[in-house]
Image: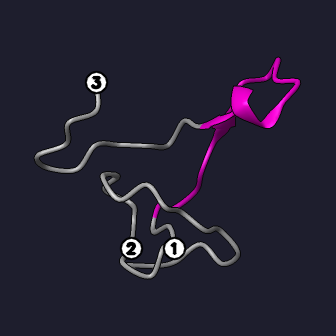
Amino acid sequence: MNEIKGICCEVKNCVHHNKDNSCSAGHITVGSSMATTTTETKCETFECCDGCTAK
């Protein structure tokens, strides 16, 4: 898997998460376009891995 340099990912239930907390997605998309604080942003490239409990 290729790592996106400079991206730290701690979302262990994402299919793109590597054990060294890097991201292996080919690209990432971060939303929302109307965010005004960091809590209003999210990784829209997230995909649950097998056995994921997120809804």
Q: For mark 3, give the secondary structure.
A: loop
Residue drawn at the location 39% of the way across and 64% of the way down: 17
Q: For mark 2, give the secondary structure.
A: loop
CA separation in Å, label 3 and label 1: 23 Å
Percent coordinates x, y for residue 19 in the rendering: 36, 78
Q: Quadrant of the C terminus?
A: top left
Residue 31 against residue 48 in the figure, above or below: above
- What residue is shown with label 1? 22
**Which amino acid type is marked by label 3?**
Lys
- Tell me, for residue 47, which label it has, or none: none
**Which amino acid type is marked by label 1?**
Ser
- What residue is shown with label 3? 55
Neighbor class of circle 1 (other Cα within 10 Å; few <14, some 14-19, many 20+) is: some
**Closer to us: 33 or 9:** 9
Q: Are marks 3 and 1 in contact (CB under 8 Å)?
A: no
User: Magenta part of the protein: which range?
Assistant: 25-42
Left or right side of 6 for 34:
right
- What residue is shown with label 2? 18
Residue drawn at the location 72% of the way across and 26% of the way down: 40
CA separation in Å, label 2 and label 1: 5 Å
Q: Are marks 3 and 2 in contact (CB under 8 Å)?
A: no
Q: Are marks 2 and 1 in contact (CB under 8 Å)?
A: yes
Residue 43 against residue 41 in the figure, above or below: below
